[in-house]
Amino acid sequence: MNAETSLNMASALPKRTVVFAWDMHYSCNYRCPYCWYTTTGWTELAKKSVYKTAQEWAEVWERMHRKYGRCQLRITAGEPFTYPDFPQIITTLTQWHDVQVTSNCSNTEAMEKFAAQADPKRVEVDCTFHPLQGEFEPFVENVLRLRRSKFTANVCYLAYPPQMPQMGEFKKRFKERGVYMNMAIFWGRYKDKDYPFAYTDQEKAWIKEVIGYETGPETVNLDPLVIRGKVCGAGQRYAVVQADGKVYRCGQLCHEGMSLGSIFDPAFELFPTGRACSVDYCKSKEFQAAWEDEEKQAMLEKNKFSSAGAASVGAPSQGS
Ligand code: SF4
């Protein structure tokens, strides 16, 4: 899922110096209305998907291991469990990297195979519940199956206006099954309004109720801070790999002409230093992986960060 900012995801994976967010392929068995891929058009996007074997991916990611050590790969985009031979690919890649997979948890057969094969110390699953597409019972059963096999399997729910009234009820149902339900803020348009700015007082109250505690407006992105000009490690310690292998600084800076190169190119390198951010808001909170720890905490806890300072190299300007 994209178009969102998730909260409270407790990852058990160790912190790594470099994080790659990898859009493995543009294919999904769901058609969620809030998904950027649905609004952009799956058919067109699918043309970018490149299908490779476990051995072929091993060559790519072993090379990244030689350059950057053990990294964290965050696999999203479409539904990863529908990628051919996904359990085998993950088992192979975890020799060199830790892996976090975001899934709609609907493909029970692939998940069973994965749970039997993958190493729960090296891979975890963020399970996103999509109530407009999937049913509660099979979803929660797949989450519990992963947990029985010792995997960290967090659950997330998107605060998308049409599915907000039932948010509290689902939170209760998950709790009855021993599962904590995290929430994600919706970034996008619904009924000609821009979210998260358009949340009503009632919707804000539901969000607070589900989070369960008072939190600063920036933390939940209800009142996001402008970060244009801030030097950011996106491209240096964090990067997005799209399904065709092209690498970008982050999800917002991934337009034509902005690519750092291809992950398939043996000469590919990340930037040696951070560069200025050229958008107003860090919508998907990728700064959490890209910024220095201290600055990240300041942004999250005190709603501020040290002054933008001089940009090392100006990034191309892009609206947000
Ligand atoms: S602050 Fe966010 S949007 Fe800006 S470059 Fe960094 S990761 Fe990208």
Image (cartoon, rainbow, N blue to C red):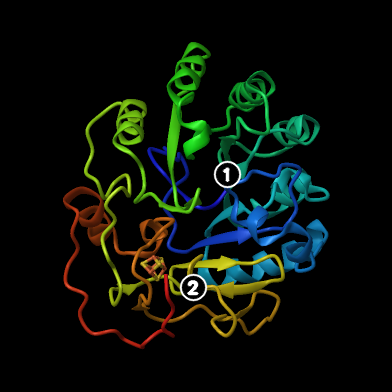
View extreme (bottom): residue: 313
Q: In which quarter of the image is the C terminus?
A: bottom left
- Foreground residue, 124 or 230? 230
> What residue is drawn where x is 73% and y is 68%?
59
In the displayed structure, would residue 86 be above or below residue 114? below
The disc placed on residue 110 is none
In the displayed structure, would residue 169 be above or below residue 77? above
Q: Does the residue labelled 2 lie within 8 Å of ligand 1?
A: yes
Query: What element does badge 1 sit on?
Result: loop
Distance between the alpha carbons at the discs numbered 2 and 1: 29 Å
Identify the amino acid type marked 1: Arg
Res 124 → quadrant: top right
Q: Quadrant of ligand 1?
A: bottom left
Regarding residue 287, the answer to whether it shows in the image is yes
Instruction: Identify the residue position indicated by label 1 in the image.
Output: 122
Regarding residue 155, the answer to whether it shows in the image is no
Q: Position of residue 276 (x, y in %)?
A: 34, 79
Res 202 → quadrant: top left
Query: What element does badge 2 sit on?
Result: loop
Identify the amino acid type marked 2: Leu
Image marks 2 and 1: residues in contact by CB distance under 8 Å: no
- On the rendered structure, is 251 left or right of 243? left
- Foreground residue, 47 or 239? 47
The disc placed on residue 253 is 2
In the displayed structure, would residue 242 be above or below residue 89? below
Q: Where is residue 97 in the image (x, y as percent from the top left)?
A: 58, 55
